[in-house]
Structures are given as C-alpha cells and as structure tokens.
Amino acid sequence: MGLRRYLASKTGWYLGALVVAVVLNFLLPRLIPGNPVDVIVSGLGQGGLSSEAQRQIYEQFMKEFGLDQPMWNQFVTYITSIFQGNLGKSFAFYPTPVTDLIAQSLPFTLVLQIPAILLGWIIGNVLGAVAAYKGGAWDKSVFTTSLVFNSMPYYCLSIILLYVLAVMLGWFPPGGAYSLGNSPEWSMAFFTDALQYWWLPFISLLLINIGGQAVGMRSMAIYELGSDYVNYSRSLGIGDAKMTTYIFRNAMLPQITGLALSIGTMVGGALITELVFSYPGMGTLLFNAIAANDYPVVQAVTLIITVAVLVANYMVEVLYGFIDPRIRASKSGEK
C-alpha cells in the first residue's frame, strides 16, 4: 500500500486510540465506589467536627471540585483543561496543582527507569545474541540465568536485594531517595547523596530487564538461524560475518518493539519497585492517588502513561516503515 499510505493509516489508528483512551481515562476513576470528598469529610468527622459543619464542607468541596455538575459537563471541563495544559488541583493535597506533584515525582522515575531500561536492553540483547550464536555451555548458562530473572516478579527481587544488600550487609540505604533533612536541588552534594539511594532500585530493575531482553533475543536469533534464507545463503557461500548481520538485524525488530513498550510503560513497571524502596516516583504518586480517590492525579498520571505508550508504539511503527524491507518493497511498487 506504499509507505505514505502505511504511515497515514497508522496515524489514524493511533489518533483514534488516543481519543478512546482519553474518554476511558476520565470515566474509569469515577467508577471507583465513593468519591474523594467522602474521604476528606470522614477524616474531618474523626476530629470531632459537627454534622452540620461536615455537611457544609461537603457541599463546598463538591462545588469546588466540580463534582456536583453533570457527568457530561465534567467531561467537557476535563477536555478543555487538557488542551489548556491544566491538569487541575489535587483533591488530597488541595490546593496543590497536579503539575507540581508530577514535577516532583517524574524526575525520580526518569533517572531510575531510563538508564535501567536502556542498559538492560543493550546488555540483554548482546547476551542473547551471543548465546544463540555460540550455543553449548555458554547458551545454557546465559539462558538459565536470564530465564530466572525474567520469571521473577519485580517485588521478589526488590525484597531480596533490599534484605541482603541493605539490611544484612549494609552496603546501601534501606529506602527513600535521599537523606532526611535534604531537599531536591541541582547541586553536587544532593546528587552524591541521592546516588547512594539510587543504586539498589536501579540494580533490581536492571537485572529484570536484562533477563527479559536476553530471553527474547535468544529465541528470535535461534529462529532466524534456522530459517530457509540462512540455509540458502550458506549454500551460496556467504560468509558468517555477512550472515550474522542479516540474522540479528531481523531478530532485532521485535526487540525494538519491546524497548518502546518498556519506555512507554515505565511508570507501571516502577510502581512495585518504588513502593518496596519507598522511592518518591510516579509509581508511588499513582498508588497514593488511587488510595485517596484523587481523580485529577490519577487522570494525569494515567494520561501520561497512555500518551507515552501510544507515542512509543507509533514511533516504532514509523521506524518499521523505514527499516522493514517488506514495507520498502511495497513503497517501490506504489503507482
């Protein structure tokens, strides 16, 4: 259908998926039983506030948060605010803007997840490719070790590392992102302090990512090594160096998709790890917001996740249009 038609079709599908995701992003938090005003008012009631005062505060907060309006009106306000770059104010930390909470949490997630994902992708693919190419004892050892880490849940490895390296050996701090009394700032002193707390959650994420990428790359490389074009090329006398280039270039296509998905879903992958290590990233922010029925924060974080996943997958589709020979062949046949 040609490269241009291919890209136009993919763009249309992803725009449609974005529209559906935005609608669900608005509706799903509101399907949770109760609302954040109930949580706030019930907390005030435990402090001895009278019923009449609670009722007045309840009505005031319902009006302030816009929850007394019809659902369609709330949706229009939500869409308008998104286009204006306004993600609203947190219910649980009112009147703190949601953008301020995200600005505090997002850097911690980025500096933890992106190095772990990229290094895990590179190291895992190299190990998987070498294991498939060499075979024998090297393949068995790499595959077994990678399979163990790939099958292990995030929280299991995090708890094991936390107990062994932090509690028993005392090599790392047991939790948090920086020492008590410090506050995030752009200084070498804070960077040095935060680095001590960064290593342990980083190692736990890195090992899981290496295991998953190594297993995937090994499987794809073994499949390519046994394909017909490899046997035919070898019969023509094409050297191993040239064949290796073809084999691993084809095997890398699914791994590129895996990299995009890992980057797009980094918040979800960091959730358990951040909770285990008390790391103040986006995963912890989302967990606390769900517990408090904090609609604006839940909507903002899930919207970021949705957009990141869609953009990452769309970029992979565009990249495939240029590196996949089948799409280039369809382009050459376009009238």
Image: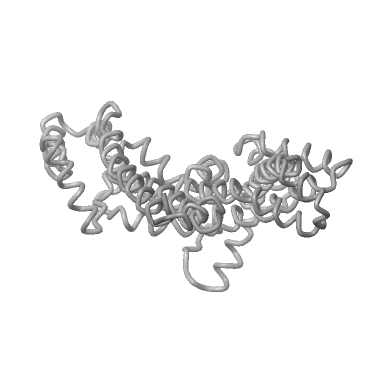
Q: Position of residue 13 (x, y in %)?
A: 34, 44
Q: Position of residue 226 (x, y in %)?
A: 75, 40
Q: Position of residue 252 (x, y in %)?
A: 63, 51
Whether residue 232 is visible, yes or no, is yes
- Comparing 281 with 21, the one in front is 21
Residue at (48% x, 46% y) in the render? 265
Is 187 above or below relative to 153? below
Residue at (41% x, 51% y) in the render? 6
Residue at (26% x, 44% y) in the render? 91
- Comparing 273 with 95, the one in front is 273
Q: Which residue, as the protein is rendered here, is positioned at the far top?
A: 33
- Comparing 272 with 251, the one in front is 251
Taking the image as shown, residue 137 lies to the left or right of residue 73, namely right
Q: Position of residue 114 (x, y in %)?
A: 55, 56
Is 192 above or below relative to 50? below
Taking the image as shown, residue 276 lies to the left or right of residue 129, namely left
In what quadrant of the picture does the C terminus appear?
A: bottom left
When asked about the image quadrant of residue 20, the answer is top left
Taking the image as shown, residue 180 lies to the left or right of residue 247, namely left
Whether residue 197 is visible, yes or no, is no
- Comparing 33 with 315, the one in front is 315
When asked about the image quadrant of residue 47, the answer is top left
Is 209 above or below relative to 155? below
Residue at (43% x, 51% y) in the render? 314
